[in-house]
Image (tube, rainbow, N blue to C red):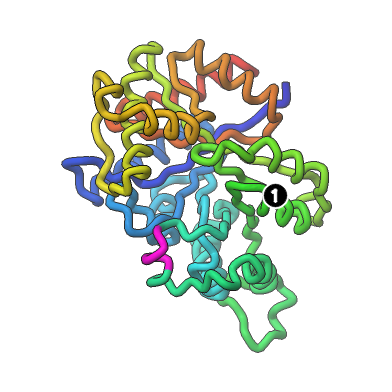
Amino acid sequence: MKKFELSVLDLAPVKQNKTIHDTFNDSLELARKVENLNYRRFWLAEHHNMASIASSATSVLIGFIANGTKKIRVGSGGIMLPNHSSLVIAEQFGTLESLFPHRIDLGVGRAPGTDGLTAKALGRNPQNINQHFPHQIQELQRYFSTENSESLVRAIPGEGCDIPIYILGSSTDSAWLAAEMGLPYAFAGHFAPDMMEAAFEIYRQNYQPSEKFPTPYIIACVNGIAAETDAEAKKLSTTLYQAFLNIIRNDRKPYSPPVDDIEKVWNYMEKTHVLRMLRYSFVGGPEKIKNEMQQFQAAFGVDEMMITSHIYEQQARLRSYEIFSEVVKEIF
């Protein structure tokens, strides 16, 4: 079995009866915890207009996390590039890399990270996103290059910074692009499992080696909820189920505590939809988690598994990531 590393995707989840200040402190505590457990990287995702997610100002939050840690790589998973000017993102991440050398990642995606009305407020033009997104990535690469010093438009800070760019995807479209550009690829298996297998196959078969990335590199993001027993993990997972149920119901309220019986919360149609979206979720005690991770890696052979964990209680969340670390040590 191919060896893989562990990483974290954090959405800065806002919980009922907690403040956003509490949320950010919880994220920092988690980052410090997984840094001590030798997780590879800690990414934050751009979302807007959601009372349950506080990572809208992603670059600012990356700086907060990087400043409170020492060695773990910190980055975006991702910046939704069509929401922004390429120059502004180059300057922001150039500033971050200058503050925290050799620790900053830039993951980029083309989705809005929000609803249609908010996407319009962000200034997106849906007519040209598919054509403009690859151009924006090329703009970022140019702004980061030393060769751009002769250009009339320069990213300072940013120019000459070694900031790896990762392409994010939830369908096969970005797999083709990542392969063509010779860039690492991160797939959102934690909410869009249907095309993951096809996307990985497309990416590997069509990969064009680049100077920085001579071989394909795949990160699979999955949901992970580990506890001392299967029963405990199953109850903790009801916060995750309720969060996705709220998406279906278009209810963006903060995360809910776990419930004893999730069957009383959703109907059959809602349950079917949620469980399909959450197909790649590792939920259980250490032995169950170990078996599921081994099966997943045997099927997909990824370079990293990026765990996102919707657990309401902070100490249970910290313990979950600890269990994942212990399980991977047992596997390898």
Please state, as top left, top right, bottom left or bottom right, where the C terminus lies in the image.
top right
292 or 165, nearer to the observer: 292
Report the side of 311 relative to 183 (left or right).
Answer: left
Task: Farthest residue to the front: give it.
Answer: 269
- Give the secondary structure at mark 1: helix
Is residue 117 part of the magenta span, yes or no? Answer: yes
Is residue 312 part of the magenta span, yes or no? Answer: no
Q: Which residues are the magenta region?
A: 115-119
Q: Is residue 94 above or below residue 189?
A: below
Task: Farthest residue to the bottom: give it.
Answer: 152
Report the side of 34 relative to 297 (left or right).
Answer: left
Residue at the disc numbered 1: 175
Count of numbered labels shown in the rendering: 1
Residue shown at the point (32%, 25%) measured from the top left: 316
Locate residue 60, reporting x and y percent. Answer: 40, 61
Q: Is residue 160 visible?
A: no
Q: Residues within 10 Å of mark 1 (few under 14, many from 20)?
A: many
Residue shown at the point (63%, 65%) measured from the top left: 130
Q: Is residue 275 visible?
A: yes
